[in-house]
Amino acid sequence: MAQIEKRGGLLRKSSASKKPLKEKVVLMYDEIFMTEDPSKCSPRFWEELFLMKVNLEYLEGKLESLDGEELMKIKDNINCLFQHCIQALGEEHPIRVVNALQTLCALIRGVHQKNKSTSGFDIINMLMGFDKAELCMKNLMESLDSLLCAEGSESLKSLCLKLLLCLVTVTDNISQNTILEYVMINSIFEAILQILSHPPSRREHGYDAVVLLALLVNYRKYESVNPYIVKLSIVDDEATLNGMGLVIAQALSEYNRQYKDKEEEHQSGFLSALTNMVGSMFIADAHEKISVQTNEAILLALYEAVHLNRNFITVLAQSHPEMGLVTTPVSPTPTTPVTPLGTTPPSSDVISSVELPLDADVQTSNLLITFLKYSSIVMQDTKDEHRLHSGKLCLIILTCIAEDQYANAFLHDDNMNFRVNLHRMPMRHRKKAADKNLPCRPLVCAVLDLMVEFIVTHMMKEFPMDLYIRCIQVVHKLLCYQKKCRVRLHYTWRELWSALINLLKFLMSNETVLLAKHNIFTLALMIVNLFNMFITYGDTFLPTPSSYDELYYEIIRMHQSFDNLYSMVLRLSTNAGQWKEAASKVTHALVNIRAIINHFNPKIESYAAVNHISQLSEEQVLEVVRANYDTLTLKLQDGLDQYERYSEQHKEAAFFKELVRSISTNVRRNLAFHTLSQEVLLKEFSTIS
């Protein structure tokens, strides 16, 4: 018997003498693309259509192949198909429901592809007709809501979420997608929450639900009242918030695990052996090749939860097993197109493995630790534009956390100590820290470590000024909390001071290049004011009196850097150039640092001369400092412990619009044909009763 091949909607016998035959469903689609009503000659046309396996590729391709005029001629038939799809969603037979959902996906994508240049209203008219649009969308959203909340098939729920993601992301700019007005009016917010609050449905659909929610929250968020924003901001159900936190933690954990695997693979490879022989000259090059696609969609979801919902802050500290340490078989993820911003969900095996009882041998972790590890990876490389955006979003999330009173309470809680193994960029002048030597400390220490790591590793020609400013702001906000609540944190502050002074040195040595692009005095002023915070209020939050002495020692030891900075800002503040005002602010801010240097330096020199010592030890310098505090006069500086609170709408709107556009494009690309495949569904509904 001749073998039959199926290709592009054709059933073709291998014998060349016969004409190729079309599948029945393709013949039915062809009838829809005629101007006549297909049900005129065949009254059971629509009933039969939804019993046929959908040919997504053919239907979308056919829609795309027509020009605008041809499409308008068959508008009534397309409206009719859309309405019958919605009717079929209420059918008892799951096969009809599946076919209707898939047909809707193809219709929405196909018509949008065709009408990219036209307005959203034309698309509404083409799909539903203006007069029926409101009722159509109401029925569609109610059916989707029922399917998502029912105790029925998981595959059906998955397809409902895919359809919703398809609906939301058909336009690059989701705020121009007018169909979403109906999704705002007929909210599915409660259905999303229900998925997140029930462990079985969360394991199956949590990722898609969280990404869908993050996108819906960003629809016209600056122009009108978005009900999803309002509702998300007041959620207080613990199970729901924890569920959302778990989905986000699992996705970030999966990224961290993939990165760690690639890093280990790298280290055990040939290049590693070569590096060991020759020295560390190739380390940076080797490191640059370790690249795992970042996940902005899940990061956006974390940001919206932290930014909008005060109750979600408690979820950051909820303990769960260290996800990277739970060993489970990981199913291979389907290949997706290489896209700028990853939204590929973690495999379901990884998701289900994490919700295990806590094991005494596995270190507990929480969402904040997972996020800090993720940040330490994506913030390493900011040369790539998308990683730069990822790093920026990580710092914005940390800014929101650093401003929150409750978050600060658990960050600084001495009874909540963790080992946080952050990724550190390989650098020639330092050894890689051994994981075993990591101390257990309050979580704020890990945040500060991350900020210090960023400061030290990004002094380069393509200077990420915006990220540096955010980084210093995070440190400042944490210090303000410590000063206000008199928290004496046992932290190696010297590392921070040293990093800040090195950053000042970098700004000065690259003055000409940097000033061509940035106002470096904004950053210099922030750094100087951090030192002023320590000088003015250090006695209220530094752990011991000797820490305060060490601060003075560090300022005196590095006095040349502060002297050079003063000379630079004095030069520019006395000229009538564009930097006059910005530089003069730094001049005024340096008053106490200069007073310390000018007060102690002569006394140290005198001590050395009297005792005939050419070079004083640190202890000898500290002895001089302690003996001469009483005669030091400092000026009280106002506003050092004040800061402007984070505001998205006025300052970050452009960034988020661009980010959401990238995420939308990527989600759409990843909704490839295989994600809407019927294979699983047909197995589940193998009989039609």
Image: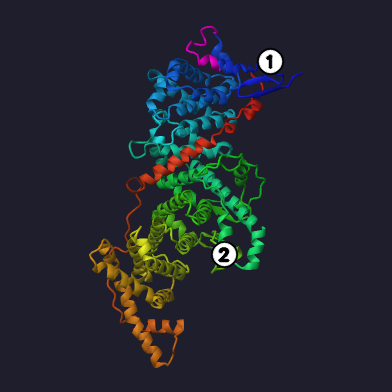
Name of the residue lying farthest toward the top: 41
Residue drawn at x 47%, y 29% as measured from the top left: 113
Residue 171 in the image, given as x and y percentages of width and height: 44, 33
Please tell me whether residue 344 belongs to the stretch shown in magenta. Answer: no
Q: Nearer the viewer, residue 301 or 383?
A: 383
Marks 1,2: beta carbons within 8 A: no
Give the image quarter of residue 613: bottom left
Residue 53 falls left or right of residue 384 = right
Residue drawn at x 46%, y 16% as measured from the top left: 74
Tag 1 residue: 18
Tag 2 residue: 438
Q: Secondary structure at mark 1?
A: loop
**Chosen colour scheme:** rainbow
Residue 135 in the image, given as x and y percentages of width and height: 41, 20
Q: Nearer the viewer, residue 16 or 686?
A: 16
Residue 314 falls left or right of residue 230 = right
Q: Give, as a three-letter code, the residue at label 2.
A: Leu
Mark 2: few/some/many CA within 10 Å (<14, 14-19, 20+): few
Name of the residue lying farthest toward the right: 1
625 w.r.t. 9: above or below = below
Q: Secondary structure at mark 2?
A: loop
Q: Nearer the viewer, mark 1 or mark 2?
A: 1
Give the extent of the magenta segment.
Answer: 29-42
Mark 1: few/some/many CA within 10 Å (<14, 14-19, 20+): few
Q: Earlier in the sequence, mark 1 or mark 2?
A: 1
Q: Give, as a three-letter code, the residue at label 1.
A: Lys
Q: Nearer the viewer, residue 54 or 636?
A: 54
Residue 517 in the image, given as x and y percentages of width and height: 35, 57
Number of labels in the image equals 2
Q: Nearer the viewer, residue 552 or 670?
A: 670
